[in-house]
Image (cartoon, rainbow, N blue to C red):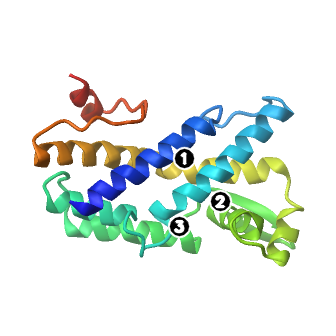
Amino acid sequence: MQVLELYCKSAEYHLELERHFPVTSHDVYQIGLGTNQEAKDSWSRLILAASFRKFVVDSNESVYLPKVLEALASLGGQKVTPEQIREFRKHLNEIRAGGVILGKYNVGDGREWTAWQVVDALLNGMFLHADLRVSSKAAEWNAWMKDQSLFEWLGSFRRVFLDLYQSSLQTLEELHGNPREARVETGLRTPLAQKRQK
């Protein structure tokens, strides 16, 4: 139960960041918005990526999505098998390792990186840490490539992230016997979310 409580708080914190650092769209990548809007979207996505990595990058994090799914399954909040949870973990590991290609980008010297590799370089080159070699390389990349990578990486997990948030809220409500409404509007319109609104 503690995992779900922490996950809900962490998810709400991230969704609050989304409200303060809005992007034009989480679902459809748009170009030709104008230099100022594109720059705003890119900076917002970088901030959101820094917040979001705890859910899908580090398996030691308490709110790592497979751990949340495992906690939900143990409490009856999700009907998933141990094998499905293992496959989910494997999928996230493969994305980090470049085995699952969200997008492929030419980063120079004849090399191609996946969206996650580009995002990881952006976060660790200057934003979260300072790495002269990585930041110098990233400075050569065009703005579109960096923003498209951030969009792809964030978008590939957002639906699962929101679904687990709604499932966690519902499971906690059932365990505590009293409603715990989402403190942030997710805009989610899945059958589960619609059930909660009735």
* Separation (CA) of disc 1 from disc 2: 11 Å
* Separation (CA) of disc 1 from disc 3: 13 Å
Looking at the image, residue 156 lies above or below residue 86:
above
Q: Secondary structure at mark 3?
A: helix
Residue type at numbered disc 1: Gly
Q: Secondary structure at mark 1?
A: helix
Q: Which residue is mark 1?
A: 155
Total numbered badges shown on the rendered structure? 3
Q: Which residue is mark 3?
A: 95
Tell me if label 1 and label 3 are in contact, CB under 8 Å: no
* Separation (CA) of disc 3 from disc 2: 9 Å
Q: Which residue is mark 2?
A: 115
Q: Mark 1, residues whose alpha carbon is within 10 Å: few (<14), some, or many (≥20)?
A: some
Q: Mark 2, residues whose alpha carbon is within 10 Å: few (<14), some, or many (≥20)?
A: many
In the rendered image, is residue 98 in sight? yes
Q: Position of residue 104 (x, y in %)?
A: 69, 60
Q: Residue furthest top?
A: 198
Asked whether 86 or 173 is in front, the reply is: 173
Tell me if label 3 and label 2 are in contact, CB under 8 Å: no
Numbered mark located on residue 102 in the image: none
Q: Mark 3, residues whose alpha carbon is within 10 Å: few (<14), some, or many (≥20)?
A: some
Mark 1 or 2, nearer chain start: 2
Residue type at numbered disc 3: Ile
Residue type at numbered disc 2: Ala
Q: Position of residue 117 (x, y in %)?
A: 66, 67
**Side of 168 where 177 appears, left or right:** left
**Side of 165 where 76 appears, left or right:** left
**Side of 168 where 144 appears, left or right:** right
Q: Position of residue 106 (x, y in %)?
A: 79, 62
